[in-house]
Structures are given as structure tokens and as C-alpha cells.
Image (cartoon, rainbow, N blue to C red):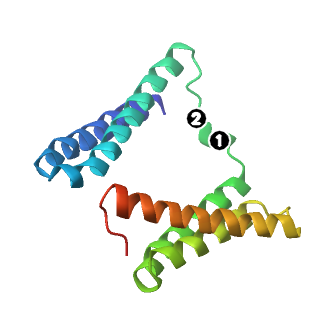
């Protein structure tokens, strides 16, 4: 995994770096969000490469995929399917409704053991708050229209 992490980290860094350079041609207001995402992507890719080198130095380059239990793989698959479904539904239901539904269903799924009234109330509050705050931040502050 060590070599694959280094190669993928470098490739991802170059992709985000190219996107960062391309975003310089955007108008300043439109480029703000794109530049932030590209810089974060470059930072995370650099962290992947550095972590891979550190693991090689510490001789802990064992495959972490063997340590992930089957239940975790199932959860990752369900969450991935939920994200794909969210991307499809957002076109029809709009940003706010689909984001509230996605956030609430994801929180409820990830915390299945919690089945009391307070959990459902806090889930609703968090889902609605996150959707509205993100809508305000992207639409008003970053000038990025959401569906």
C-alpha cells in the first residue's frame, strides 16, 4: 500500500494543482470556493504522501484493508449509495429538502442504537440547521447558486 499511496497522492496533488491554476482564470468571487477546495485537496494529498513515507520509516506499511471488518465495508457501501441517491434526488427535490432528508437519514442510520425522542429531535434540528446554514454560506457569502 505504501507505494500506491505515494503515487496516488502525487497524482491527486497534481490534479488539484492543475485545477487551482485553471481557477485563476475565474472571476474573483467565483474562484474563492474553488480555490479553497483545491488547496484543501492539495493539502490532503500531501498528507497522504507524507503519511506513507512515515509508515515506511516505521515499518508499519501493512495493508490496513485486512483490518477493516465486514460490517464497516457494508456501512461504507450503504453510505456511498446514499450519496449517489442524494446527487440524483437533489435535481428534482431541490437543495434544502434533499439535504435535510440526506442528513437526517444518514444520522439515523449511523446511530441505529439511539432510539429515543431526544435523538430524533436533535437529528431534525441538526439536519435543518446544516441545510439552511450551507444554503446561506454558499448562496450569500460565496455567490454559488445551489439547486
Task: Write the residue at 50% across / 74% down.
Answer: 96
**In screen coordinates, is 68 left or right of 62?**
right
> Residue 63's mark?
2
Q: Pinpoint residue 48: horizontal percent, then vertical percent.
A: 44, 32
Task: Write the residue at 65% across / 41% down.
Answer: 66
Q: Quadrant of the C terminus?
A: bottom left
How many other residues sit within 10 Å of disc 2, few (<14), some (14-19) or many (≥20)?
Answer: few
Using the numbered discs, state the Cα–Cα distance from disc 2 to disc 1 in whole angstroms: 6 Å
Q: Pinpoint residue 127: horizontal percent, then vertical percent.
A: 63, 66
**In screen coordinates, is 18 left or right of 98?**
left
Task: Write the residue at 28% across / 50% down.
Answer: 34
Compared with residue 143, is residue 81 higher up or lower down, i.e. above or below? below
Q: Residue furthest right?
A: 116
Instruction: Determine which quarter of the picture holds residue 114.
Output: bottom right
Q: Nearer the viewer, residue 38 or 67?
A: 38
Q: Are marks 2 and 1 in contact (CB under 8 Å)?
A: yes
Q: Secondary structure at mark 1?
A: helix
**In screen coordinates, is 55 left or right of 40?**
right
Q: Residue furthest front?
A: 140
Dot 1 corresponds to which residue? 66
Amino acid at each position: 500500500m505504501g507505494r500506491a499511496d505515494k503515487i496516488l497522492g502525487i497524482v491527486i496533488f497534481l490534479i488539484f494543482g492543475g485545477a487551482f491554476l485553471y481557477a485563476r482564470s475565474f472571476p474573483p468571487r467565483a474562484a474563492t470556493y474553488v480555490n479553497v477546495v483545491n488547496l484543501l485537496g492539495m493539502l490532503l494529498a500531501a498528507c497522504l504522501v507524507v503519511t506513507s513515507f512515515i509508515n515506511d520509516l516505521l515499518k508499519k506499511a501493512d495493508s490496513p484493508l485486512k483490518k477493516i471488518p465486514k460490517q464497516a465495508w457494508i456501512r461504507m457501501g450503504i453510505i456511498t449509495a446514499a450519496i449517489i441517491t442524494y446527487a440524483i434526488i437533489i435535481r428534482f427535490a431541490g437543495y434544502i429538502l434533499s439535504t435535510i432528508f440526506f442528513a437526517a437519514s444518514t444520522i439515523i442510520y449511523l446511530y441505529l442504537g439511539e432510539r429515543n425522542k431526544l435523538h430524533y429531535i436533535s437529528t431534525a434540528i441538526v439536519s435543518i440547521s446544516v441545510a439552511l446554514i450551507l444554503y446561506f454560506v454558499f448562496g450569500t457569502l460565496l455567490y454559488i447558486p445551489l439547486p
